[in-house]
Amino acid sequence: MAKQHVLFDKVIIITGASSGIGRASAIRLAHCGARLVLAARSIDKLETLAAGLPIPDKVLCVKTDVSVKEDCKNLVEQTVSYFGGIDILVNNAGLSMRAMFKDVDLKVLHRLMDVNYWGTVYCTKYALPHLLRSRGSVVGVISIAGFNGLPARTGYASSKYAIRGFLDTLRIEHLHDGLHVMVFSPGFTASNVRIAALTADGTPQGRTPRDESKMMSAEQVARRLERGLVRRRAYVVLTPAGRLIVKLSRIFPRLSDCLTYNFMAKEPESPFKKQ
């Protein structure tokens, strides 16, 4: 008999599960035998995804806007009512932007903080009592931008830095009671995040400016997420370039700034251009 996967029958909430990393993670963890709660604003996309998973009866779909506190509370309550508890919370829902700070409407930064940061805080707040009982895991999907600022992405980087600070503090607060806290940091990943990214006036840019085929796939990211959960890692930073930037930002911050400046200045149609 094959050895049962360590995540078998674990109750896992994934926010932002309708596309990209969230969708790929749902598929990956379903094949590990987990019981899944899929959360996103599009219930139709969630139900279509659930129908294609190995055991649809082990999947609960909950329409959720993570920027709304009551939605996050409802997500947790429905999970506990349906499955009896929570083992893992994956805070994946996120929004990006592309605009210079001097040009951006401040409502864009508020929107990013509401979705990225407050969405993580709300879901974690309501799930935490259940995670403490199960000695479970809380995950925050951030970005290399959560370690090193990216020009034309002030709101995005700020929200990701904030998530990292929140989760690092949560880890220390619960250092001796079995709670696993993981900061998960992909690099550029092929997904719809750049299509939905907000421009200076808050409208989505509608298309990606990058060659998505050269990026890490969402499926590759999902495999690394699974591995991080199994090993209960505190930090997972993907791609060699990502790990290099994280190290440089700590040891040689000025060099890291220069490399980031030159790299981002080459982005097609970017509002940030090398001076």
Image (cartoon, rainbow, N blue to C red):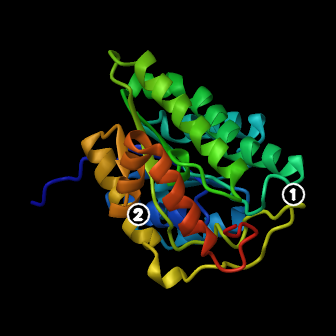
Whether pointer 1 and pointer 2 mark residues with C-beta atoms closer than 8 Å, the reply is no
Relative to residue 241, is residue 161 depicted above or below? Answer: above
Q: Which residue is mark 2?
A: 221
What x and y, as percent, mark residue 82? 55, 41
Residue 10 coordinates in the image, percent (x, y): 37, 44
- What label does residue 131 carry, if any? none
Residue 184 visible from this viewpoint: yes
Name the kind of residue labelled 2 in the image: Val
Q: Is residue 194 left or right of residue 91?
A: right
Residue 66: give x, y in percent of width and height.
70, 45
| Residue drawn at the location 25% of the way across and 43% of the way down | 231
13 versus 179 height, above or below: below
Identify the image quadrant of residue 272.
Answer: bottom right
Q: Using the image, determine if residue 272 lies above or below residue 12.
A: below
Identify which residue is drawn at 74% across, 48% down.
112
Q: Callout 1 environment at 10 Å: few (<14), some (14 to 19), or many (20+)?
A: few
Res 63 visible: no
Crowd tier of the residue under label 2, counting other residues whose Cα lies within 10 Å: few below 14, some 14–19, many 20 or above: many
Closer to the chain start, of discs 1 and 2, is 1
76 and 182: which one is in front?
Answer: 182
Residue 103 image label: 1
Residue 265, by quadrant, is bottom right
Amino acid of disc 1? Asp
Where is residue 138 drawn, in percent x and y?
46, 36
Q: CA distance from mark 1 to mark 2?
A: 33 Å
- Secondary structure of the residue carrying tag 2 is helix
* Closer to the camera in the image, 67 or 256: 256
